[in-house]
Image (cartoon, grey):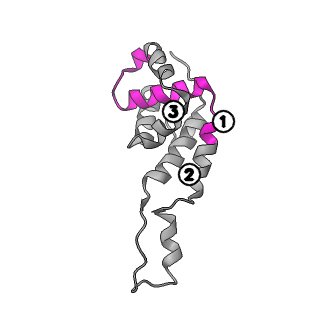
Amino acid sequence: MTELAISLEKVCYLIALTRELQVKVPMEEDEDASNPIDDDETAVIEDRADDPVDDELEAYMADLNTDEWDDLLRLIWIGRADYAIEDWGDMLSDARALPDAQKQAYLVETPMVADYLAEGLAAFGLSCDGDDIT
């Protein structure tokens, strides 16, 4: 069985962060009928330039090494059904072909990336639920 170079904890943390970002909605213009008392509550779900989750995700991804990035990309591709788990070794050259400068953008800009990562983990019999995380 293939062993992952990235820890389950790191993948699960990235799944949690990307899910937070993917539920964001575009900012709405201030409305005259808006209730100022409630206005701060919308900041949690609105996609704002100063969102601390963006900064946290960017910093976390910057700390990943090449092997961890290779695994993340391959997990996405397995989760998206571009490849099967049996192709794990063959995917390495494809993962390494993506320039390092583009890997963060690729992860963030892939729709449903959290689901694809979770599905990729499932192919290994792993999940972010329950006792798998130590």
Residue 52: x, y in percent? 60, 57
Looking at the image, tell me whether mark 3 or mark 1 is earlier in sequence order: 1
Q: Residues within 10 Å of mark 2 (few under 14, many from 20)?
A: some
Q: Which mark is residue 63?
A: 1
Is 85 within the magenta? yes
Q: Which residue is mark 2?
A: 54
- Seen at 53% across and 59% down, the residue is 49
Q: Is residue 115 visible?
A: yes
Q: Residue at x 49, y 31 (%)?
A: 126
Query: Residue 46's spot in the image, x, y percent?
Result: 46, 64
Residue at 52%, 47% (x, y): give it.
16
Which amino acid is tagged 3? Lys
Real-space CA distance between mark 1 and mark 2, rounded to the nearest whole angstrom: 15 Å
Looking at the magenta stretch, what is its main secondary structure? helix
Q: What range of the chain is rendered magenta?
A: 60-88
Q: Tag 3, which secondary structure? A: helix
Q: Is residue 134 visible?
A: no
Judged from the image, the secondary structure of the residue bearing numbered disc 2 is helix
Q: Between disc 2 and disc 3, whose residue precedes?
A: 2
Q: Is 46 drawn above or below residue 13 in the view shown?
A: below
Instruction: Reply yes or no: does residue 15 show up in magenta.
Output: no
Q: Amino acid at mark 2?
A: Asp
Label located before the other in sequence (1 or 2): 2
Residue with the most extreme right position = 63
Residue 56: image location, x then y, percent: 61, 49
- In the picture, measured across the screen, residue 59 lies left or right of residue 110, that is right
Which residue in the structure is indicated by mark 3?
103
Element type at marker 1?
loop
